[in-house]
Image (cartoon, grey):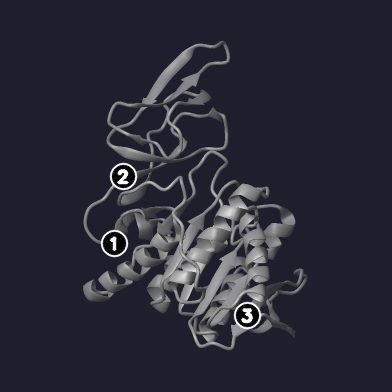
Amino acid sequence: MESSAPSHQGVRQVRRLTIPTRRNETTGELVVLEHQSEIEGPTVAITANIHGDESVGTAIVHALDAHLAAHPFAGRVLLYPSCNPFGLHERTRFVTGSEDLNRCFPGHPKGVKASRLAYTLWTDLKEQQVDALVDLHADAPNSVPYVILDRPVRQGPKARKQMAERLQDMASASGLTVLREYQDRIYTRFGLDKSLAGAVVNLMDVPAITLELGPRRRLNPEWEALGIHSCLGILSQLGVLGESPVRHDTFVEGQWRRTAGPTPTKEGLLRVHALPGDTVEAGDLLASVWSVEGTCLEHIVAEERSLVVAWVENSWVRAGEVVLTMGLPEQGGL
């Protein structure tokens, strides 16, 4: 189903993509808000709500929809306000059960529900011949906003270097701190090459980056404004808009690789000492774990120079669980 209306410099069209369903399943559809300019330019996709409990991207897409309708731009912009309408309605991260949509691409028309949903989105992106993609996510309330660069693990050395440069250019235009994904072996073991951005980079040979703009499960005007400015900067770098990218005040210089921080060995109340955006050295205090009685059970310290990115949402932590995302300095190419 389609409908269209004139925008500032072109046409805004609403498309609805039918998701393949099985007997007795609830039907679903993906909404696409498409802006086509009269001026030639690239086709850029901006996706949101891959994880159903991460809705800040949906609000950002709505704002971008209004911006494009009121300002001159070039090319075509495809806005997907909710790539996981099932998870959004059920207020959960997954599609059903433990099906993570962001590990299912390119999907299959006869697979599990998440796989069929992935296939619907993937097919549209291929048919529209997108030139770049931005995927909007959320992390945690106690986090720094950042961009993730996927590893072009399925490309040869020359193509990989070229893709890395394109990804870095897009990421720099966001104005946010940039984190490279886990090293190749861990990247593929975690199935990150089957995430939306990872699959677009590795299977479509199209640059795609992920913006992490916390928190989950609620909307926040400050984070929405940040995401809007980041997306406008990226669209400008791609030649869609004429606005100048602005570096956010939380930006941390450096070439960082995403990793899990040190884990607690005791169960207890987590007290954070190093804040998101802090750069720490080996031996610096990151957090402490306390008992209910008020006794300090242990100190969690940095093992090497690193960047504090995001703390776990729970204040009560268990031994061995990941409580901190960090960035490690990384030399060399992506």
The answer to which of marks 1 and 3 sits earlier in the sequence is 3
Q: Is residue 164 left or right of residue 208?
A: left
Task: Name the residue beneath numbered marker 2.
Answer: 328
The answer for how far apart the CA atoms under marks 2 and 1 are is: 14 Å
Task: Name the residue beneath numbered marker 1.
Answer: 334
Residue at 58% x, 89% y: name it: 38
* Helix, strand or loop status at disc 3: strand
* Helix, strand or loop status at disc 1: loop
- Residue 95 visible? The answer is no
Towards the viewer: 33 or 10? 10
Task: Examine the rendered structure and indicate whether residue 198 appears above or below residue 286.
Answer: below
Towards the viewer: 13 or 85? 13
- Residue 33 visible? The answer is yes
* Helix, strand or loop status at disc 2: strand
From the top left corner, tell me how far across and down residue 165 is, in percent: 31, 68
The answer for how far apart the CA atoms under marks 3 and 2 are is: 39 Å
Residue at 65% x, 57% y: name it: 52
The answer to which of marks 2 and 1 sits earlier in the sequence is 2
* Amino acid type, callout 2: Leu
| Residue contact between numbered discs 1 and 3, judged by CB atoms under 8 Å | no
